[in-house]
Image (cartoon, rainbow, N blue to C red):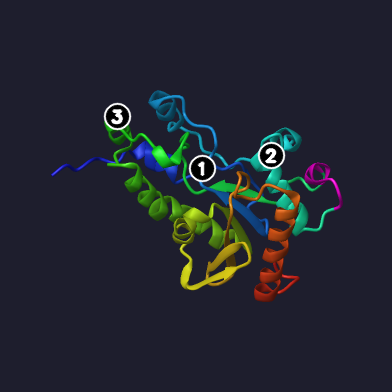
């Protein structure tokens, strides 16, 4: 029977803020993706990154630059509609300090290692040896359990009211990652939702921000934000979650 030894550096790397753009942890609304969009060049690059440090990030002084990425730009759409910002989402994102340490929003990812194509991940013997986990599927389960516990403690401490997770195909992974009460799972227009943090936080799982079948227009984002707002208003109270 093969028993691998988990790389302690991987554990410290995974159970940290690595993989998150960051922002203001005390914000009422967080956004959670699966992983960063840029992959590691090779195993040596990953191994070097696992050395640290893994500080809380932010967009301080960089909001305009960060919005050049389409996913981040659509996050600005979301916050613009949720908070009823004036016309011009990029200008408003700068004004309201989106994802800044003293601004609005916190952006994170459930998994720390980024892959070019999640549907065909190459988890070879060298990767298994470096990390100490048998396969990509085992890695996913380990992160849900252990990295999830790290972020659950942050949710408990900072108590965001709404966490918007992008990628409906990973609904159960998100719900388990945040330790949602599965008896509270509900369906809404364009989303699934469940509660965590002693029912104080709503975890919405929504379509990916982009792609042919995702949120790819202002109209779709406006509709999504409206549906999230109505559900949160009815569940948490209209003055208690923004």
Q: CA distance from mark 2 to mark 1?
A: 17 Å
Label 1: state its secondary structure.
loop
Indicate whether residue 18 is drawn in magenta: no
Q: Find residue 177 and report its horizontal and vertical position in percent.
A: 46, 57
Indicate whether residue 88 is drawn in magenta: yes
**How would you rate the neighbour count of disc 1 (Cα within 10 Å): few for under 14, some for 14-19, many for 20 or more?**
some
Q: CA distance from mark 3 to mark 2?
A: 34 Å
| Quarter where residue 26 is shown | bottom right
Residue at label 1?
35
Regarding residue 103, the answer to whether it shows in the image is no
- Residue 59: mark: 2
- 224 displayed left or right of 144: right
Numbered range of the magenta stretch: 86-94
Label 3: state its secondary structure.
helix
Q: Which of the pair 27/66 is nearer the observer?
A: 66
Regarding residue 184, the answer to whether it shows in the image is yes
Work out whether mark 3 precedes mark 2 in sequence or the reverse, and give the earlier one: 2
Q: CA distance from mark 1 to mark 3?
A: 21 Å
- 174 displayed left or right of 127: right
Residue depicted at 47% across the width and 54% down the height: 170
């Amino acid at each position: 029977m093969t028993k691998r030894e988990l790389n302690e550096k991987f554990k410290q790397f995974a159970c940290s803020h690595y993989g998150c753009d960051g922002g203001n942890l005390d914000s009422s609304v967080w956004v959670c993706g699966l992983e960063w969009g840029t992959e590691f060049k090779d195993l040596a690059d990953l191994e070097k990154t696992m050395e640290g440090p893994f500080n809380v990030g932010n967009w301080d002084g960089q909001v305009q630059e960060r919005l050049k990425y389409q996913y981040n730009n659509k996050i600005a759409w979301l916050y613009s509609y949720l908070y009823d910002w004036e016309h011009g989402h990029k200008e408003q994102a700068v004004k309201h300090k989106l994802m800044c340490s003293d601004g609005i929003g916190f952006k994170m990812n459930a998994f720390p290692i980024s892959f070019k194509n999640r549907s065909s991940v190459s988890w070879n013997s060298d990767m298994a040896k470096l990390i100490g986990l048998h396969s990509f599927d085992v890695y996913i389960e380990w992160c849900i359990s252990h990295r999830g516990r790290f972020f659950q403690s942050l949710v408990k401490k900072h108590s965001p009211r709404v966490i918007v997770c992008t990628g409906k195909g990973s609904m159960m992974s998100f719900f388990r990652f945040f330790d949602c009460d599965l008896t509270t799972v509900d369906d809404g227009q364009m989303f699934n939702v469940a509660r965590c943090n002693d029912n104080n936080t709503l975890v919405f799982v929504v379509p990916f921000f982009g792609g042919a079948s995702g949120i790819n227009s202002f109209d779709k984002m406006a509709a999504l934000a409206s549906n999230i707002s109505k559900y949160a208003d009815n569940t948490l109270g209209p003055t208690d979650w923004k």
